[in-house]
Amino acid sequence: MWPILTFLALGALLALHLWWRRKFLRARADAEREIESLKRQQEQSTFHHQVRQEAIFNSMVEGLLLLDERGRVQLANHAFAQLFELRADITGRTILEVLRLHELAEMVERLGPDRPWTSREMRLPGIVDLWLRISAAAIFSADGTRQGTILVFHNLTRLKQLERTREEFIANVSHELRTPLSHIKGYVETLLDGAKNDPDVSTRFLETIARNADRLELLIEDLLTISELESGRVTLRLQTVELHAAVAKVFDDFKSRAQARKIALTDETAAHTVHADPGRLEQVLSNLVDNAIKYGRPGGRVVVGARNTDDAKVEVSVKDDGVGLPPEALERVFERFYRVDKARSREQGGTGLGLAIVKHIVQGHGGKVWARSEPGKGATFYFTLPATEPTENGKVGKGEAGTQPG
Ligand code: ADP
């Protein structure tokens, strides 16, 4: 009896053991699966976090550089790479190895607990100077040990260029205003000092004063026009304009000036029509015809022509047979106050703004302006404007009112 009971007890114990073992193994496998899944979740979350961080860094317009505690690059965003035209991976390299900018390396080195943040402007000479505002901040842990540095690079180049253009413009304007003004003052003083008693001299002086006052007026008018056009708030009253009628009006205004220099004015614009603001178109034609007479050959010819282009535009040309322009001046003449011959321009009453005004107006219409010349043989100025179709009966299409920023 006992052996049987013992045998049964042992059998029960073995069964229990096997049951527990199976349960234990299953529980262990479940736990392992659980740990694996948690690990995967954590990895995924770290990966998403990194991707999000990189996306934020790379969407910044400012260049961003993160250095570790040894001053080696940990992270550089796209804007930074673009700013310094870097193509290779720079992770792990020092700022000096990457940029060769000692000033910048020193700036980072000087950061410390007493000076955790700094910012300065830097000019990097090149074909085009690069102007940067660089801000650097040291990163410290809670116990005060240096963890690394974060650097932000703000590109100021465009801003600096605008600032320089503005300063040059103000200097030019002041100079242009001062010249006729000092003439006026000088002649007035001489008159007051006694010259007024000589009728011949005083007439001559007063004429000079009047001429300089006219010059001042013209300059101020042109300056106001330029500032109005550059403000971008100009509204163009667009309509269909007969080119021929606009040219006739301008020729009429310049008739006596052309006669004084024995210059023949010829209109070859035929039946072209353009989509333009009539007042502004006349201003463009006036400035170009004025120049063609001023710089044209005495006894010569000024011809205004037109032709249709393939891209639904009308190309207008104003041609003279005067001194012409050297090749290097062909583009620069459209800059404010650029003159090939300063003395000649002033002597002719020029303000140096006429072609800049032409360029603004034409571009405001969506057109282009350019010049061609053979020095000594004359110059031709071209501009394009959107064409309008004449109606079937040969008359000009119905005028459309429209606006467009200048
Ligand atoms: P300005 O008032 O001095 O004429 P513009 O802006 O009208 O100013 O012209 C700029 C410069 O371009 C002139 O000073 C002159 O040197 C040159 N220029 C313009 N038109 C002609 C032309 N038809 N022939 C030769 N030079 C020209």
Image (tube, helix red, strand yellow):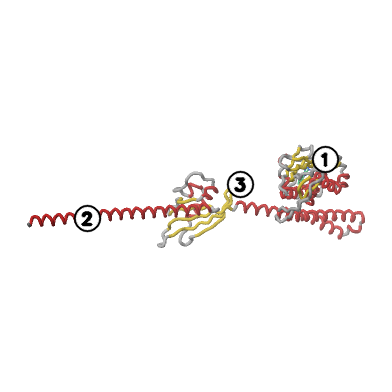
Query: What residue is disc 2 on?
Result: 19
**Mark sitting on residue 70:** none
Query: What residue is disc 1 on?
Result: 268
Residue 240 pos. (x, y %): 78, 48
- Residue in the image at 79% along x and 56% along y: 181
> 65 and 127: which one is in front?
65
> 366 and 333: which one is in front?
366
- 403 vs 121, left or right, is right
Where's ligand 1: which quadrant? top right
Q: CA distance from mark 2 to mark 3?
A: 82 Å
Please report contact status of discs 1 and 3: CB closer than 8 Å, yes or no: no
Q: What amino acid does circle 1 point to?
A: Glu
* Quadrant of the frame with the N terminus: bottom left
Q: What amino acid does circle 2 point to?
A: Trp
Is residue 218 something one can see in this rendering?
yes
Residue 214 pos. (x, y %): 83, 54
Pick out the residue farthest to the left.
1
Disc 3 crowd, CA 10 A, few/some/many (<14, 14-19, 20+) = few
Secondary structure state at the residue bearing disc 1: strand
- 147 vs 275, left or right, is left
